Amino acid sequence: MRPGAARAPRLPKVAALCCSALVLLLPTLLALRGIGAPPAPGELQRLERVVRGQSPGERVDTGVSRLFHRAGVAADAWPERADEQRALLVRARRSQIAALAALTGLTYLMVSVAGGRLRALLACAAFAVTPPVFDAGYVLRAETAGALFATLSVFLLQLAARPRARRRGRRPRRAAVLAGGLMACAAAAIAMACEATPSLGESLLVPGVILLLAAVQLALRSRRLLERRGLVGVPVRAINGRLIPWTALGFLAPAVALWVQQRSYTVAVDALEFAAPQSPLLPSSWPGFVAACGLLALGAVAWITRLGVRFGRGGRISPDLVLFSACLVFLLGVLADAVPRDPLPLAPAAAVVVGTGAHALLVLALGALRRRRS
């Protein structure tokens, strides 16, 4: 056997890994294009306010916003020269680029846990070409930190809902304690997201929507069991064991968020200053807008169909159901906005649905091609 013969089968795997890494780095690379761009409206003023510091009664930035803006700079005084201010802004934008890279990684992990790696890569590619990332991904704003915490909370809820194989000798309480710890961490992440960006208050609704869908699913299964076995055959204890943790989370998350905001805010929420919308959520051009809306619709139909097929099979809350509930809450929250806000925190949810639509379109195209060849 030739020395290179054993290495040949590894080449496709290496190429796939390189393509995956490139897709994961694509949002960061696109944001790095504009790291030296002129300041966006209000960007320099926010950084100046954070660097100079303000008295507790006058500050209009959240605690997470101040930490996020100062993460990339070590200056204690605001420079007077315009070129020095520009250089300080470029250094501060490094925290924006790092947070965007972390947001891309969390998006990949969320979708891979729920629907596979290919769908996750398509979602990351869609995230890279959304206007909040493609056009204004370099702009330093606290909404990026809020989006990071909100996405982290969804991923933690997925891990809490992920089924674990039972092993011989393992105590059942250990899995319950692990799931409870993940839910507590998710509640803390939701609270930090609401503290950084109060407009992300819809993240508090995610546990409630998950609980509602799970209750409907269990009610349908319980009705069939009631018809077959009677009232005695309904597993009430198992139903309570699945619903009570999510019910507790639905009460815990708002309580933690309220406690964090009371400890952090010294002014009313209306007095806080946030970044103006830097770009729309969907492309402005007609071809891009039509393509995005088409993939959103196809992704929603494919996702609902897949969940509908699984709805009657099992009564457990799956990571796919958690991700669907989060995307549903965030995207429907856009319709309830009375004041325009920066769409970057909503970009991961839109990218996940668009990636699902692209995956469904790819499956349909490959199936049609296979039938045509056969």
Image (cartoon, rainbow, N blue to C red):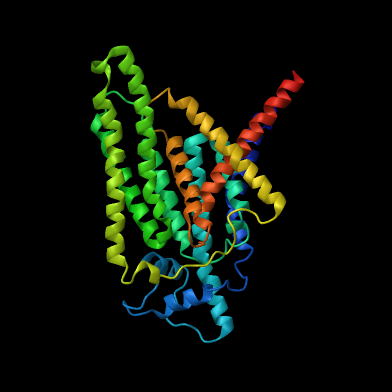
Residue 7 shows in this picture: no
As rendered, which of 364 and 289 lies closer to the eye? 289
Asked which quadrant contains residue 171, the reply is top left
The image position of residue 22, as x and y in percent, is 62, 48
The image position of residue 66, as x and y in percent, is 40, 69
Please tell me whether residue 258 is drawn above or below residue 272 in the rendered image.
above
Quarter of the N terminus within the rendering:
top right
Quarter of the C terminus within the rendering:
top right
Q: Residue at x 47, y 37 (%)?
A: 113
As rendered, which of 61 and 176 lies closer to the eye? 61
As rendered, which of 317 and 85 lies closer to the eye? 317
Going by the picture, which residue comes out furthest to the right?
Answer: 373
Going by the picture, which residue comes out furthest to the top?
Answer: 228
Please tell me whether residue 89 is drawn above or below residue 107 in the rendered image.
below
Q: How many numbered discs sit on the rendered protein?
A: 0
Q: Residue at x 58, y 38 (%)?
A: 299
